[in-house]
Image (cartoon, rainbow, N blue to C red):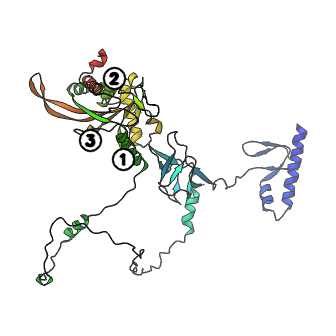
Amino acid sequence: MLSHSRCFSRTLGRSLSALSQQGNSVLGRRAISGLSACHHLAYEKSRLECGRRSSVFHIRYFKTSAVCKNEVVTVNTPAFAESVTEGDVRWEKAVGDEVAEDEVVCEIETDKTSVQVPSPAAGVIEALLVPDGGRVEGGTPLFKLRKGAGAAKAKPADAPQPKAEAPVTAAPPSPPHPSVGPIPTSMPPVPPVPGQAIDMKPVGAIKPTAAPSIPFASAESTAKGSRSEHRVKMNRMRLRIAQRLKEAQNTCAMLTTFNEIDMSNIQEMRKQHKDSFLKKHGNKLGFMSAFVKAAAHALADQPAVNAVIDDTTKEIVYRDYVDISVAVATPKGLVVPVIRGVETMNFADIERTINELGEKARKNELAVEDMDGGTFTISNGGVFGSLFGTPIINPPQSAILGMHGIFDRPVAIGGKVEIRPMMYVALTYDHRLIDGREAVTFLRKIKSVVEDPRVLLLDL
């Protein structure tokens, strides 16, 4: 073992000696700089240690190359979920922008959600390989990144700095040349006919009058009130929502039944226990958990509402589990994250899950798996002040419950008129599968549970 080590030492020493004798070799001079004689070689933390003096040189330090720092990497589109095949790119950075590690460079809008693509390392955007709004699939190259933050700072240094000693008076800008468009090949559209009759006068009957002086504020308000319009391209999520809702109208035989719920008891229960509920579970007690639990109880009582028609096999699929989709409005459109296994949850579990899904929706972090597989949907338009409405079924489900606002209304209680907080609820269902008797019974079951939550304890 010792002889092998000495042979290796002699060979390395002769090689370095040969490099040192080449006067025109820069690499040789750099390689032997900081060398000393030693008897044996041993690596320790990127350096070669030496022992007793000998004719063999010793390398003190290794220096890495700068190639890895300025390396250009290509970032590809991440893999989508199984139900998503493609998406549209929305760029948040441009060529030449400096990005930090994990900073979002672009966002890919799919049919169900948006996928953010972060930068794998700090560096500068070298090139965008897909135009803004372009369609990509999983694995498609998106952009090129030059690693290293120093590359971005080197670009402004190349431009000469202007001297501030001799001020130069700028020439007045020349008037812009009118852009010459293509020669029209068709007549312009005919303007619409005004609704009011136009007062026709001969030219000679018109007397010249002095132009009225328009104050500056009036002129500014006239400019602000100009009748203009602009067009915005629909994103993929909005297109998918429109397609699915239209498919539901064309496929399902939708019918809606209504009822009203007295919210006095549930409001009193919430008022009495909200502080202790928040202290123990860390979440606020809302009305949505009561409706979700009431829906799970009613779905177990009416399994046809929880079923669905398989149009390919012409079969009815009955589900023994309850996964309730909760509609959430986001700036980009309506999303429906799913609360799974509601039949085994209590109020605290439901409120915690709703808060988690709502937070992910607001941060645009919902995954496709969070919105797949619901068996029933609840839409709460009451948070926006809705009084009445008919929701549309979320396919491939068979029914949807619409909640609305709570308003004080006069109702007959025991032969007397009282003011109670009332809410209208609507159930839209697929009449191909669900009969009117089942739909009305289902809605009355929800009404009884919300008005008196003790029904859940007694399993009535």
Estimate the spatial distance between the alpha carbons at disc 2 and disc 3, rounded to whole Å.
30 Å
Q: Residue at x 36, y 22 (%)?
A: 300
Q: Is residue 54 visible?
A: no
Q: Which mark is residue 331?
A: 1
Q: Give neighbour class at mark 2: few <14, some 14-19, many 20+ (Cα, 10 Å).
A: some
Q: Secondary structure at mark 3?
A: helix
> Up-down: is 101 above or below 370?
below
Q: Residue at x 78, y 62 (%)?
A: 26
Task: Name the residue furthest left.
Answer: 416
Q: Secondary structure at mark 1?
A: loop
Q: Which mark is residue 384?
A: 3
Q: Give neighbour class at mark 1: few <14, some 14-19, many 20+ (Cα, 10 Å).
A: few
Q: Which mark is residue 90?
A: none
Q: Quadrant of the N terminus?
A: top right
- Marks 1,2: beta carbons within 8 A: no
Q: Position of residue 414 (x, y in %)?
A: 11, 21
Q: Position of residue 416 (x, y in %)?
A: 8, 25
Q: Residue at x 86, y 61 (%)?
A: 21
Name the residue type under label 1.
Answer: Pro
The residue tagged 2 is 302
Name the residue type under label 3.
Answer: Phe
> Up-down: is 243 above or below 91?
above
